[in-house]
Amino acid sequence: MNRHLYTLLFHLGLPLIGLRLYLRARKAPAYARRIGERFARRLPALRPGGIWVHAVSVGESIAAAPMVRALLERHPELPVTVTCMTPTGSERIRALFGDRVQHCYLPYDLPWAAARFLDRLRPKLAVIMETELWPNHIHQCARSGIPVVLANARLSERSARGYARFAGLTRPMLGELSWLAVQTAPEAERFRRLGAPAERITVTGSIKFDLHLDPALAERAAALRAEWQAAARPVWIAASTHAGEDEIVLDAHRRILTHHPEALLILVPRHPERFAEVHGLCRQRGFVTRRRSAGEVVDAATQVLLGDTMGELLFLYALADLAFVGGSLVANGGHNLLEPAALGKPVLSGPHLFNFLEIAAQLRDAGALREVQGADGLAAALLELWAEPERARAMGAAGLAVLHANQGALERLLVGLERLLQEGAVAEAGGARR
């Protein structure tokens, strides 16, 4: 498939995209709003000539935050525009940056929408987080002489096989990227095999290791646990869970309650549109459940606290003794294992970690990560770690050591972005003189 065929198919698929938006809006009404932005119409006022950062959703927005803050600090004269594709991503961007950045949805990957968007924005540099590759957006940038960076790039073997099936589309697209700042050497090799020019690929590491925490986070968490009179209660968190996984987590918690009747589970579904559904599931299973969003009191009778708020995940991790990271008991590929590790928490996951193979391997090899199977395996691991606090502390310390040993990717990425901005400024000055 080449780009022209892809574009034709995208146009033909627009009715299906509209149907998908409608169906998603039934659970999350925000999907029915700002539709015009998805076609580069009714865009907010955007000051042109700055830096454009695309972060598809919540996880990428959080990963991009230190980079965006550094760019704002180093280039106060340049407007920074951050785009995403989801309402939850939009909420997170606004919560993270407020009015310090410009924000809108990224228009769909249609040539005319991409061209209209770029005509409004006219960025000096485009930065795409991780692996959100849109052929028409990248091509329109290349046509306009806008350098495009794939930052904190990751590519699993599974994803690489998918891209390889469309080599006629993938190879030219990768050839139009100015720089690929890749997390690991194996991922760099996958990009090379797909056709990315080797001289434009640099292994910079994962900026997720460059996680800086609010020093007051642990104190705030300890104070809230004391308010709950839960300082001595066994508390664990299951974060970023997916459909089919919540049931396993609740089954594990039921087993834990037979040994520790006072145990508390903090359950945080990955997607906000599932909050009400998971709350209903907890109640249906007979658990005494409180909702964080409602400010309901957590008392000695509370068995499950539903983490149904946005932007609090690190704080909820800090409240727990032990952390399970979801998207891993089902074949979703896992989520960020480094957030609980950065808080010194022992980390547990399921076996499906194909989105984080290198990070998982480092944590596993250091003894900071324990992988489990099913409700029985999850419950057994949690009970064992509560019974052996020294082992739990050693796991937490090992995770912190891995985090500290791998920091520096953010600075390497910023150096590369600075180089491209300077090259662009030189080229612009040369063009002005001519």
Image (cartoon, rainbow, N blue to C red):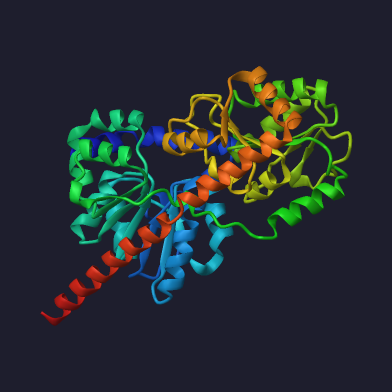
Residue 183 is situated, as x and y percent measured from the top left of the image, at 37, 45
Say whether residue 167 is left or right of residue 286: left
Residue 296 seen = yes
Identify the residue at image location x=49%, y=54%.
210
Instruction: Check the picture and name the quadrant holding the C terminus.
Output: bottom left
Residue 13 is situated, as x and y percent measured from the top left of the image, at 34, 33
Residue 29 seen = no
Identify the residue at image location x=41%, y=70%.
79
Residue 384 is situated, as x and y percent measured from the top left of the image, at 71, 26
Instruction: Tell me: residue 263, above or below residue 197.
Output: above
Instruction: Check the picture and name the quadrant holding the N terminus.
Output: top left
For the residue pair 368 and 322, the one nearer the viewer reads as 368
For the residue pair 259 and 11, the one nearer the viewer reads as 259
Say whether residue 110 is left or right of residue 411: left
How many numbered marks have been drawn onto this rendered protein structure? 0
Instruction: Tell me: residue 71, above or below residue 258.
Output: below
Say whether residue 311 is left or right of residue 24: right
